[in-house]
Image (cartoon, helix red, strand yellow):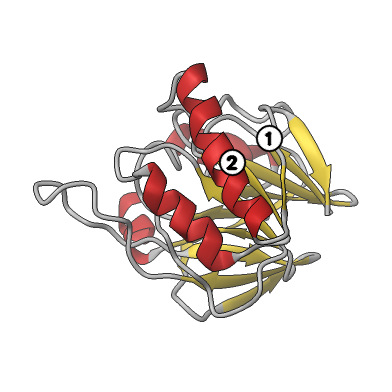
């Protein structure tokens, strides 16, 4: 399974010719090749995790692609057929088994509405929590760990990585940070991953890892 880290919070997962796209949002450039997409997962409704333009481009090139999203995404993505996903759901599509965990976006501020958010485990290997510190009820081989966000304090992110204790981790959700901020936050998450005996690796946009 090949996982490519794209800009901000978007991940591309490939097995043979089948593709899974997670959170193609406003800080992510369009996929170079949107053909062969069998599924799109949207963890929540915020624009940095999905846009109508991204979904339209993907579904034009891959008309059979299924879209899965938290309940709030179903309402927000008017005009697209979105299958709602909930904590504890498991779905199989193409070569991908998607297991969902979590219910709610992390709190940004009392003045900002809290929306639905559901993380996803791909093929019992890669877990991405979306915008939440969801500690899933299963072991995590590889964690895509949020590193920068309006809702994120580095101490909380460190505690999250420590609680999940993945075998390996890489940072994501990074476009809100400067280069200096990204390096600083990533070093903190790396320390927690290392302390639990895991391996931490930074993936630049477009860089891939085989799982």
Pick the residue in front: 72 or 102: 102
Pick the residue in front: 184 or 88: 184
Residue 102, disc = none
Residue at 40% in and 28% down: 176
Q: Which circle's residue, 1 or 2, is located before the other in the chain?
A: 2
State whether residue 53 is above or below residue 65: above
Label total for image: 2
**Residue that label 1 marks:** 202
State whether residue 18 is above or below residue 205: below
Corner quadrant of residue 208: top right
Pick the residue in front: 104 or 65: 104
Residue 200: image location, x then y, percent: 70, 45
Residue at 37% in and 56% down: 73
Corner quadrant of residue 60: top right
- In the figure, is residue 168 to the left or right of 71? right
Quadrant in the picture for the C terminus: bottom right
Which residue is the extreme one toward the top? 179
Residue 99: image location, x then y, percent: 61, 73
SS under mark 2: strand
CA separation in Å, label 1 and label 2: 6 Å
Residue 171, disc = 2
Residue 124: image location, x then y, percent: 72, 71
State whether residue 96 is above or below residue 73: below
The reply to whether dot 1 and dot 2 touch (C-beta < 8 Å) is yes
Residue at 73% in and 61% down: 167
Pick the residue in front: 21 or 195: 195
Residue 56: image location, x then y, percent: 53, 38
State whether residue 153 is above or below residue 93: above
Label 2 packing within 10 angstroms: few (<14), some (14-19), many (20+): many
Label 1 packing within 10 angstroms: few (<14), some (14-19), many (20+): some
């Amino acid at each position: 399974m090949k996982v490519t880290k794209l800009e901000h919070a978007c991940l591309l997962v490939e097995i043979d010719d089948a593709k899974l796209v997670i959170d193609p949002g406003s800080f992510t450039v369009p996929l170079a090749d949107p053909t062969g997409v069998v599924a799109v997962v949207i963890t929540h409704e915020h624009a940095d995790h999905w846009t109508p333009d991204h979904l339209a481009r993907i579904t034009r090139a891959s008309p059979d692609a299924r879209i899965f999203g938290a309940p709030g995404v179903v309402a927000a993505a008017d005009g697209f057929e979105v299958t709602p996903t909930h904590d504890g759901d498991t779905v199989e599509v193409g070569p991908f088994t998607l297991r969902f965990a979590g219910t709610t976006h992390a709190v940004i501020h009392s003045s900002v509405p809290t929306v639905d958010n559901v993380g996803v485990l791909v093929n019992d290997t890669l877990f991405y929590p979306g915008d939440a510190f969801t500690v899933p009820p299963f072991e995590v081989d590889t964690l895509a760990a949020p590193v920068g966000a309006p809702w994120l304090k580095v101490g909380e992110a460190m505690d999250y990585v420590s609680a999940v204790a993945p075998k390996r981790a890489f940072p994501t959700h990074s476009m809100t940070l400067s280069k200096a901020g990204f390096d600083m936050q990533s070093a903190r998450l790396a320390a927690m991953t290392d302390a639990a005996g895991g391996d931490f690796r930074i993936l630049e946009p477009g860089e891939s890892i085989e799982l």
